[in-house]
Image (cartoon, grey):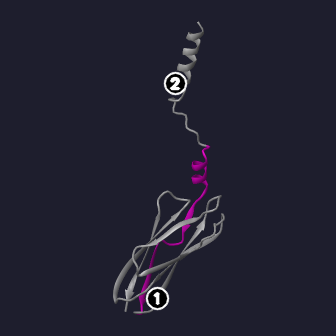
């Protein structure tokens, strides 16, 4: 009789794991729901710039969430662009920036990208700038 009760309890616990109950309070899910990055612009046209004069392009964002945003990685698509970015946590309501510095060595049109990874988004954000070196 005891083995029958034990078997029923074991089956009941086993079935409970398949009920599809989702825990919405996990730290990762709760964190993802409370952070947000709102970019002022993800594409900037710098227009005409003189050859041989580096051009700084500032991409600003605001933390519209309820927890701090941390920029974890910034990567330029090519060696012709250097990057600078805010390395401290950006508190809710604060603004911060990612700066791309294009070397403008070659004449002609250009379009470059900088990929930004934060703790607020699963997918990185690709920022683009374009113009003409004259």
Label 2: few (<14), some (14–19) or many (≥20) C-alpha neighbours in 10 Å: few
Q: Is residue 83 positioned above or below 106 on the image?
A: above
Looking at the image, which residue is at 45% across and 92% down?
Answer: 53
Q: Quadrant of residue 110?
A: bottom left
* Outermost top residue: 1
Magenta residue check for 46: yes
* Outermost front residue: 3
How much space separates mark 2 and mark 1, taking CA atoms?
64 Å
Residue with the mark numbered 2:
15
Label 1: few (<14), some (14–19) or many (≥20) C-alpha neighbours in 10 Å: some
- Quadrant (top left, top right, bottom left, bottom right) of the C terminus: bottom left
In the image, taking residue 9 as reference, residue 75 lies left or right, namely: left
Q: Is residue 8 positioned above or below 113 on the image?
A: above
Residue range highlighted in magenta: 25-50
- Dot label at residue 54: 1
Q: Is residue 57 positioned above or below 87 on the image?
A: below
Answer with mark 2 or mark 1, whichever residue precedes in sequence.
2
Q: Position of residue 124 (x, y in %)?
A: 47, 63
Q: Nearer the viewer, residue 8 or 113?
A: 8
Q: Position of residue 26 (x, y in %)?
A: 60, 44
Q: Secondary structure at mark 2?
A: helix
Looking at the image, which residue is at 58% across and 6% down?
Answer: 1
Q: Secondary structure at mark 1?
A: loop
Q: Quadrant of residue 78?
A: bottom left
Q: Is residue 101 positioned above or below 64 on the image?
A: below
Looking at the image, which residue is at 65% across and 59% down?
Answer: 67
Q: Position of residue 125 (x, y in %)?
A: 47, 65
Q: Position of residue 42 (x, y in %)?
A: 47, 71
């Amino acid at each position: 009789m005891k083995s029958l009760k034990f078997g029923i309890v074991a089956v009941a616990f086993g079935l409970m794991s398949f009920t599809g109950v989702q825990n919405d309070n996990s730290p990762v899910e709760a964190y993802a729901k409370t952070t947000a990055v709102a970019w002022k612009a993800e594409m900037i046209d710098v227009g005409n710039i003189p050859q041989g004069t580096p051009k700084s392009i500032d991409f600003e964002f605001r933390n519209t969430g309820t927890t701090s945003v941390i920029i974890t990685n910034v990567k330029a698509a090519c060696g012709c662009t250097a990057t600078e970015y805010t390395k401290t946590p950006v508190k809710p309501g604060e603004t911060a920036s990612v700066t791309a510095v294009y070397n403008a060595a070659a004449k002609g049109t250009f379009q470059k990208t900088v990929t930004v990874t934060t703790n607020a988004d699963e997918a990185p954000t690709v920022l683009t700038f374009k113009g003409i070196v004259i």
